[in-house]
Image (cartoon, rainbow, N blue to C red):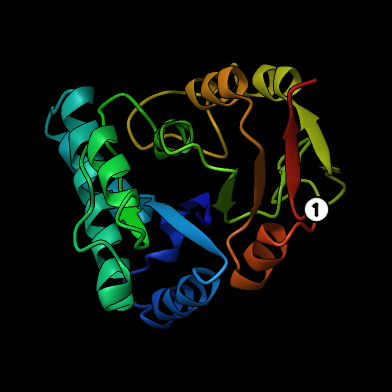
Amino acid sequence: MRKRIVIKLSGSLFGLDDTKTIKQFAEFFAKISKICQPIIIAGGGKIARHYITHARSSGADESTLDELGIEVSRLNAKLLIYALQSMAYPHPPVNLKEVANAADSGLIVVTGGLHPGQSTNATAALIAEKVRASMFLNATDVDGVYDSDPNKNKNAKKFKKITLKNLRSMLVHQESIAGGYDLMDIVALKVIERSKIKTRILKANPKILEKAIKGSPEGTEITLV
């Protein structure tokens, strides 16, 4: 059986005016599926945050806002499914059991969020655990974990490796409101720790993802100790 690679794909890739990027990723996933089975979780991105901001201003509660973000992430997942055509499982699974059943089809699986209160990072970690993935790649709009915000500090230092403990301490003050998740979150780290999932945070770029899948030390590796 091909190894399974879980990839959380940043919602920033699903832009309103950009149709080329999704097609490029679809071509990449089709190519890489010859050596592994990609199981992809689409983030909600700016479109989800747009809807969440509007609904919040109308008084919607946080769990309702979470559900809104999940719906948008599933729409993003469908865009990628349409681009993959017959190579993809035909619809986004909506719970872990459905993800496992979809993975058993051998097709490329694309899904969005699953449960209110969980970021798509946590969802991706749970899926990696459920399908016994050999690797979890968190593909984001930055190329790894830094000691400070690289967009604000030009001298920010990138970690080649970071322990779960150190990353957890960096994230402990992170907000958990709907639409507010970033590189990783505490729930995701707990799942990675208990199932010892090989995890990397890296740039959402097909060439970089391919190198990582083939064993190159791209981005930042999260280590248990």
- Report the amino acid beneath label 1: Pro
Image location of residue 140, percent across then percent down: 56, 52
Tell me how many marks there are.
1
Q: Is residue 172 left or right of residue 154?
A: left
Q: Is residue 162 visible?
A: yes
**In this orientation, which residue lies closer to the viewer: 88 or 180?**
88
Q: Is residue 78 left or right of residue 222?
A: left
The image shows residue 100, relative to residue 151, as above or below, that is above
Q: Is residue 202 left or right of residue 21?
A: right
Image location of residue 201, percent across then percent down: 65, 45
Provide the residue designation for mark 1.
Answer: 217
Query: Mark 1 Cα within 10 Å, few/some/many (few <14, many 20+)?
Result: some
Q: Is residue 111 visible?
A: no
Q: Quadrant of residue 169?
A: top right
Is label 1 in a helix, a strand or a loop? loop
Q: Residue furthest bottom?
A: 20
The image shows residue 163, relative to residue 55, as above or below, that is above
Residue beneath the point at 25% across and 27% down: 116
Q: Residue furthest front?
A: 1
Image location of residue 193, percent across then percent down: 62, 20
Image location of residue 112, percent across then percent down: 30, 47
The image shows residue 121, relative to residue 204, as above or below, that is above
Residue beneath the point at 13% across and 27% down: 59
The image shows residue 108, relative to residue 21, as above or below, that is above
Q: Is residue 137 left or right of residue 92?
A: right
Residue beneath the point at 31% across and 24% down: 117
Quarter that holds the C terminus: top right
Residue beneath the point at 58% across and 61% down: 204
